[in-house]
Image (cartoon, rainbow, N blue to C red):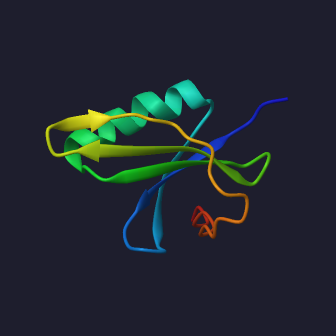
Amino acid sequence: MSSSFDILKKIGVLNFEWVEVVRDLQAAETRIQELQVRSPGEYIVFSQHTLQVVGRFSSLMAGAVASPQRAQRNATLPTRPNAS
């Protein structure tokens, strides 16, 4: 069974912007590190299989720091935009 993970960027206190989908957590961490170079901030990884946040990554002013953490079960997240 293949799992997919959504990467979302925090854009406000309760708002997130969908960025892209990746195949695994290692790919998510690598991609978020790349994204933080262009756009520092807080990113989360959302499991499409479990429907839960499975990682949280924040950047510091001096550089990106990846620190995945388990998140609360009832996090409110947006749906992924439909492909047109």
- Judge left or right: residue 27 versus residue 2: left
Q: Residue furthest top?
A: 26
Instruction: Tell me where residue 24 sits by quadrant.
Output: top right
Q: Residue lying at the far right in this picture: please name it.
A: 1
Near-viewer residue (84 or 11): 11
**Is 41 left, or right, of 66 in this rendering?**
left
Q: Out of 63 and 25, give the one closest to the viewer.
A: 63
User: From the viewer's perspective, is residue 74 above or below residue 48?
Assistant: below
Horizontal and vertical percent for residue 84? 57, 65
Residue drawn at 34 percent across, 34 percent down: 33
In the image, farthest residue toward the left: 62
Q: Is residue 84 above or below residue 63?
A: below
Residue 39 percent across, percent down from the top left? 24, 51
Front residue of this view, candidates 35 and 81: 35
Residue 18 position in % (x across, y down): 49, 60
Q: Quadrant of residue 67?
A: top left
Asked whether 71 or 22 is in front, the reply is: 71
Q: Is residue 9 above or below residue 64?
A: below
Vertical position of residue 81 compared to residue 29: above or below: below
Residue at 60% x, 63% y: name it. Answer: 80
Q: Is residue 41 left or right of residue 77?
A: left
* Residue found 46% across the figure and 31% down from its top: 29
- Quarter of the picture containing the N terminus is top right
Residue at the image point whose x is 74% and y is 36% from the top: 3
Quarter of the rendering containing residue 57: top left
Q: Is residue 34 left or right of residue 80?
A: left
